[in-house]
Image: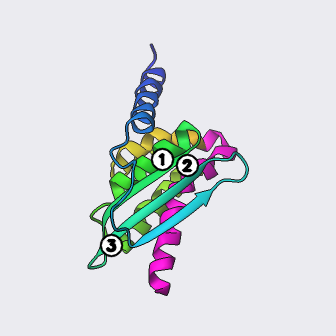
Amino acid sequence: MTERSALETVYQEVILKHYRSSKFRGELPEPDAVVPMRNPVCGDDILLQVQVREGKIQDIRFSGHGCAISQAAASMMSEHAVGKSWNEVHAVAARFREMLHGDKAAARDRALGDMRALSGVSRLPRRVKCAMLGWDALEEAEKKLAAE
């Protein structure tokens, strides 16, 4: 097995782990923002619930259905966002987006953690929206909270 195929196998396992058993799947008892997000191209959807305290994301839960990429990416996004300020979330989201658009340095950036498993999406441009669905929902949650 080549080094590349071994890495792809590990990445597939990480994606499937997040897809099948995300600890962030479910509902929050008292969310501060609830945002539905749908990818009309493929039908993936997410309902994101967020709790924010003192400018930081305290907790996140999501539900929905769709491809392994959209659901695993929502799980990974949730894992990275909890405990972070909106500015920190923006920085990670920007780096993730760079990776999805083929930035090789971003694909190696350890700060992205498990999200690096989705680096192969850069070779599938139609799936970028799937991978960004959770991040787009989180951005809408921030806008919704700022408007209140």
Q: Looking at the picture, does residue 63 appear above or below residue 35? A: above
Q: Percent x, y for residue 103?
A: 53, 50
- Residue at point 45% right, 83% down? 146
**Disc 2 secondary structure class:** helix
Q: Residues within 10 Å of mark 3 (few under 14, many from 20)?
A: many
Q: Amino acid at mark 2?
A: Ala
Q: Which residues are magenta?
A: 122-148
Residue at image mark 1: 73
User: Between disc 2 and disc 3, whose residue precedes?
Assistant: 3
Q: Residues within 10 Å of mark 2 (few under 14, many from 20)?
A: many
Q: Percent x, y for residue 77?
A: 42, 54
Q: In this orientation, does residue 109 appear?
A: no
Q: Residues within 10 Å of mark 1 (few under 14, many from 20)?
A: many
**Quadrant into which the N terminus falls:** top left
Residue at image mark 2: 131
Q: Is residue 125 left or right of residue 48?
A: right
Q: Percent x, y for residue 12?
A: 46, 29
